[in-house]
Amino acid sequence: MDISRRMFLQSAGLLAVGSFLPGCTMSESKGPNRLSKPNVIYILADDLGYGDLSCYGQKRFATPNLDRMAQEGLRFTQHYAGSTVCAPSRCSLMTGLHTGHTQIRGNIGFEPEGQYPLAEGTYTLPRMFKDAGYATGAFGKWGLGATGNSGDPGRQGFDLFFGYKCQSLAHFYYPKYLWRNEEKVELPDNDPKTQQGVYSHDLIMSEALKFIQDHKDKPFFVYLTATIPHAELAVPEKDLAEFKGKYPEKPFPGNHYGPQPTPRAAYAAMVSKLDAGVGRVMDTLRELGLDKNTLVMFSSDNGPHKEGGADPDFFDSNGPLKGYKRDVYEGGIRVPMIARWPGTISAGTVTGHVSAFWDILPTCAELVGADVPECDGVSFVPTLLGRGTAQKQHEYLYWEFHEQGGKQAVRMGRWKAVRLNVMKNPEAPIELYDLTADIAEQHNAAAAHPEIAAKMKAICLAAHTPNKQFPFFNQENTAGKQNETDSTD
C-alpha cells in the first residue's frame, strides 16, 4: 500500500486493523501480563521542560514525588514529544503517527471553542484499550475536537471525559465551566479575572482519582492530561505561599492572562502542585492494592514556554538543551519520561533508548495483547522489561512544525537535522548536529558530513505526506494560512 493511500484510509477511519508498518508489530499471547492485563495510567504535563524535574537536574525547586517515581521505576533520557506545540503532539500520542503523517499538524482553533477534530473512526490509543476490554477515562485537556463533533473524546474511545475540550480555554485555571462527557459542568462561583473560585486542576485530579477507585476491579486506562504549568501563571494562595519571596521577581504586567506579581514563584508552585498530584496517584494505587498491576507513565507535551511571565532561562527549564516550545531543536521536543511498574520495571533504572510519543500506542498494545494497526511507532516493551538487547530501534524520528515559516527535524542515531523556513523554501539547507558530542546543538556539522546531511534532507522529503488542512511546502499552500492560527497553544 503506498503512503498516500494509507494516509487517506487512516484519516477516513477505514484502516484495517491487520495491516502494519515495519515499525509496528502484532502482540501475541506470549506478551507480558497477557492473562492479567495491567492497568495503564498516562500522565501528561503541559509545557513542562526537560529540566523542570529535579531528577532531570532542576535545582531551584524540588519534585519529590516524580523523583520517587523515577527511583521506583525507569527514567528515559532520550524521549521525544510528538510535536513542539499542543494539538499535533497529542494527535501523535493518540494515533501512533508522527507529524508527517498525522491528521492534525498544527493548532487550528474554532468558535466558540475547540480545535481541528480527529476524523470519525480514527484508531486511537483509548479505542485500542476499549476494544481490549478496558474502562477508559480522560481527565484534563483534550484539544483534538469539541463537544458533538467527530473529535469529541467520547467518540474517540473514552468512556468518561472530564475537563477542558478546548486547549485555548485550558490556559485559564478558574473557568466558568468544564465538560463531563457532553454535559457542561457550570462553575458559577469562579471568576477568571480575579482568579477566585475552584482551581480547575484540583477538580480534574479528584475526578481522575475517583475513576481509578470506581474501576479498581477491572482493567482501566487513565489519560491524565494536567493543564499545568502552561500559560496563565495562577495557583491557589495556599500553594503559592511556600515559594513567595524565594526568588528575585520580575512582575508580569499582564495581557489576556492577567497580571502576575510573582511569576517565578507561581511557576515553581504550579510544578510543585503537579508533582503532588502524581504522588496522590501513586498513593491511591498503593492503597487500593493496584501498585503491582499498574504501569504509570509521565511525560510532557513539548518543551517549556515563555508565556504569561514564565521564565525558562531562570529555571533552566530546558536543561542542557537548546530551544523552547515552538522550536524543533532538542529543547522544544525532548521531554522527561518516567515509567513505573513495581515488580515488573526494575527500580532506579535509566535508559538512553531513543523513543517518541508515537511509540506509546504499539507499546501499550503489546502489553494488553491487542493488534496494532499501521503506525510509525516501535514498541519499547523490551526496554521497560530490562531486555535491551531485544529492543528494536527506530531508523529515524521525524517532526514538522507548521508555524514560524515551517520547520522540520530528523533524529537518526547520533545525528540530528533541523531545517527552517521550509514553507517558503522547500530547498532550505540542513543544519546537522552530532548529539553525542554536541547535545546543545551549537556546532553545525553539515559541511563536514555532506553525505549525512543529504540523507537527512531526503528523509525530510520522504517522511512528509500532504495534508490539505495543514499545507506545508509551497506547492501545497492552496488552503491558505489557517495553520498559523491559534498559535498560543
Image (spheres, rainbow, N blue to C red):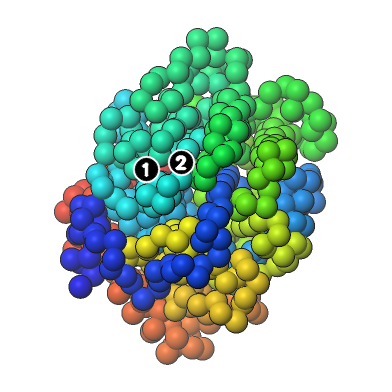
Count the numbered circles shown: 2
Residue 311 horizontal/vertical position (percent): 65, 43
Q: What residue type is labelled 2?
A: Thr
Residue 31 horizontal/vertical position (percent): 51, 67
* Residue 50 appears anywhere in the view: no
> What residue occupies the far top of the structure in this picture?
189
Q: Tag 2's secondary structure?
A: strand
| Rendered position, 37 above or below 455 | above
| Rendered position, 38 above or below 392 | above
| Rendered position, 450 above or below 403 | below
Q: In which quarter of the image is the C terminus?
A: top left
Q: In which quarter of the image is the N terminus?
A: bottom left
Give the distance between the C-alpha atoms of the residues marked 1 and 2, in whole angstroms: 7 Å
* Residue 317 appears anywhere in the view: yes
Residue 61 location, quadrant: top right
Residue 239 location, quadrant: top right
Tell me which label, 1 or 2, sits earlier in the chain: 2
| Rendered position, 133 above or below 274 | below
Q: Are marks 1 and 2 in contact (CB under 8 Å)?
A: yes
Residue 373 horizontal/vertical position (percent): 33, 63
Residue at the location (75% across, 45% down)?
Answer: 65
Residue at the location (50% across, 77% down)?
Answer: 393
The residue at which mark 1 appears reads as 157
The residue at which mark 2 appears reads as 136
- Near mark 2 (Cα within 10 A), the count class, few <14, some 14-19 or many ≥20, is many
Residue at the location (30% across, 74% down)?
Answer: 462
Q: What residue type is labelled 1?
A: Gly
- Near mark 1 (Cα within 10 A), the count class, few <14, some 14-19 or many ≥20, is many
Left or right: residue 479 versus residue 273 is left
Q: Tag 1's secondary structure?
A: loop
